[in-house]
């Protein structure tokens, strides 16, 4: 890759926290709202690392100087790498013991960094922390609730993320040499979280809503259902072998059957409906991998509860649809 340009403003002394913020042609007013929310954090000892993923919109150095109230660095990539590649370049510039994520169109509540840092300082066993989320934008404002404890979060990983990626703050040492995946568009974090979970990195979510996530047409959560289901299968083909420490072909039948998609409430009408009996067989196999492949589930209880709930809401298509509607309008 060609030479990467870097531009820094602000004090050079060590900061406790650095914020990774990749961007690619963001809407100007959304980007300004994002930066304004960083300017109003009650915790101030942080540096923002902006990563310009070779966008065509002009956000020159003076634009940032006029808006960012605090130290920052801009890394300008000579070619578009996607979110995963941009984040990996940003990770190379991290020197602080704590790292926070942020996207260019979302908003932090003022207490976010303070609350997450306080939790990580008081709980040395936790490697990464998220929070609850308020969605806003093209759909009605609503809150999304994520599980708070490590065992519940790990048990969710085969079915989807138990947190929202840009809400995360993590210890740099917990990440080690691990990196984001650069081959799965809009799924760069899944294999990374699977790897960290397999290594035993503990995670948690705060019970507080500290983040506002903008819902726009380009969000993957608003893509057509069939596209989301196919993307989910691609992510699981990559992530499940990492999470459970197995060969990739172990999961071919489960993923191809559509059972995991149905249990994750991503069923589409084009796929055959899987009976409760067959789903139970697939669920039992998944539970067996928890027992025998060293994933840090801290026992079978969390996964058993997760599977019991998902099997209940997949007894019939009507149950499945009811749960999806409930989750859409009431969060969770």
Image (tube, rainbow, N blue to C red):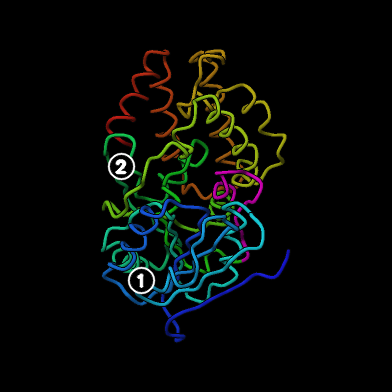
Q: On the rendered structure, is 135 left or right of 295? A: left
Q: With respect to residue 106, does 249 lie above or below?
A: above
Q: Which numbered disc, 2 or 1, marks the residue closer to the eye?
A: 2
The residue beneath circle 1 is 121
Near mark 1 (Cα within 10 A), the count class, few <14, some 14-19 or many ≥20, is: few
What is the span of residues highlighted in magenta in the rendered image?
Answer: 177-191
> Which of 43/309 is in front?
43
Seen at 49% across and 63% down, the residue is 59
Question: Residue 205: x and y, percent?
Answer: 35, 53
Would you say 131 lies left or right of 217 here? left
First along the sequence among labels 2 and 1: 1
Question: 181 or 76: which is nearer to us?
Answer: 76
Label 2: element kind: strand
Percent x, y of residue 124: 40, 68
Where, by quadrant of the figure, is residue 286 drawn?
Answer: top right
Numbered label attached to residue 31: none
Residue that numbered label 2 is attached to = 136
Instruction: Identify the residue shown where x is 55% and y is 44%.
Output: 186
Q: How far from the left and from the top, in percent, is residue 57?
A: 52, 56
Predominant secondary structure in magenta? loop
Marks counted in the figure total 2
Q: Is residue 251 above or below residue 84?
A: above
Q: Quadrant of residue 91?
A: bottom right
Q: Quadrant of the C terminus?
A: top left
Asked which secondary structure carries label 1, the reply is helix
Asked if residue 183 lies in the magenta stretch, the reply is yes
Q: Which residue is depicted at the point 45% across and 26% down? A: 265
Left or right for 250, reference 194: right
Residue 222's spot in the image, x, y percent? Answer: 44, 33
């Amino acid at each position: 890759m060609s030479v990467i340009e870097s531009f820094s403003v602000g004090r050079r002394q060590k900061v406790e926290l650095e914020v990774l913020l990749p961007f690619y042609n963001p809407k100007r007013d959304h980007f300004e709202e994002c930066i304004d929310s960083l300017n109003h954090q009650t915790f101030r000892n942080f540096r923002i690392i902006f990563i310009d993923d070779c966008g065509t919109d002009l956000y020159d150095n003076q634009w940032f100087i006029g808006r960012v109230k605090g130290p920052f660095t801009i890394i300008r990539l000579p070619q578009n790498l996607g979110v995963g590649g941009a984040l990996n370049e940003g990770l190379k510039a991290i020197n602080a013991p704590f790292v926070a994520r942020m996207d260019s169109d979302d908003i932090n509540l003022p207490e976010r960094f303070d609350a997450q840092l306080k939790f990580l300082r008081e709980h040395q066993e936790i490697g990464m922390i998220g929070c609850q989320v308020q969605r806003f934008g093209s759909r009605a404002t609503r809150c999304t609730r994520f599980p708070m404890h490590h065992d519940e979060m790990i048990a969710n990983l085969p079915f989807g993320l138990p947190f929202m990626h840009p809400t995360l703050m993590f210890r740099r040492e917990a990440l080690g040499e691990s990196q984001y995946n650069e081959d799965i568009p809009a799924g760069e974090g899944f294999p990374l979280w699977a790897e960290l979970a397999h290594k035993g990195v503990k995670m948690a979510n705060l019970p507080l809503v500290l983040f506002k996530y903008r819902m726009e047409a380009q969000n993957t959560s608003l893509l057509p259902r069939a596209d989301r289901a196919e993307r989910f299968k691609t992510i699981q083909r990559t992530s499940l072998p990492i999470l459970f420490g197995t060969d990739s072909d172990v999961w071919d039948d489960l993923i191809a059957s559509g059972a995991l998609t149905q249990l994750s409430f991503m069923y589409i009408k084009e796929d055959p409906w899987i009976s409760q009996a067959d789903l139970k067989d697939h669920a039992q196999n998944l539970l067996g991998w928890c027992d025998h492949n060293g994933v840090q589930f801290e026992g079978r209880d969390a996964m058993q509860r997760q599977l019991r709930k998902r099997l209940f809401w997949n007894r019939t298509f009507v149950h499945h649809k009811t749960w999806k509607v409930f989750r859409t309008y009431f969060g969770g």
